[in-house]
Image: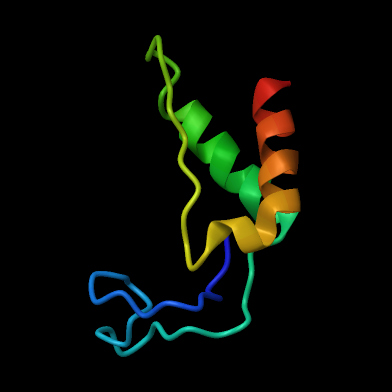
Amino acid sequence: MTQQCNLRCSYCAYSGLYHNRQHNSQKMNFETAKKAIDFFVQRTAESHYLRLGFYGGEPLLEFDLIKKCVAYIKD
């Protein structure tokens, strides 16, 4: 959802352990989120039960985006 976070957990992909990932102000837009959701749903069409998690930085910094995504998923 975002690369913003006030923590620097050692297990996080944005902790600086990877040369191409650092904490910054980037965040996902709704169009990208919809594409990711569609990709997921299309490839799990035979599943009876799906779970989708929100992560990345501190996802609740993008709570409005999460709510839009949940509404999109329900539709």
Colour theme:
rainbow
Q: Residue furthest top?
A: 48
Q: Quadrant of the N terminus?
A: bottom right
Residue 44 occupies which quadrant of the picture? top left
Residue 16: give x, y in percent of width and height: 32, 87
Question: Is residue 34 placed above or below 56 in the rendered structure?
Answer: above
Residue drawn where x is 57% and y is 39% of the image: 37
Residue 27 occupies which quadrant of the picture? bottom right
Left-right relation of 52 to 38: left
Question: Is residue 14 placed above or below 59 in the rendered structure?
Answer: below
- Tell how many labels: 0
Left-right relation of 57 to 38: left
Residue 43 occupies which quadrant of the picture? top left
Question: Is residue 30 placed above or below 56 in the rendered structure?
Answer: above
Residue drawn where x is 65% and y is 55% of the image: 32
Q: Quadrant of the C terminus?
A: top right
Left-right relation of 53 to 10: right
Residue drawn where x is 62% and y is 77% of the image: 26
- Residue in front for this viewpoint, 62 or 21: 62
Residue 24: give x, y in percent of width and height: 55, 85
- Residue in front for this viewpoint, 58 or 29: 58
Left-right relation of 74 to 38: right
Question: Is residue 18 placed above or below 59 in the rendered structure?
Answer: below
Residue 20: give x, y in percent of width and height: 37, 86
Residue drawn where x is 48% and y is 83% of the image: 23
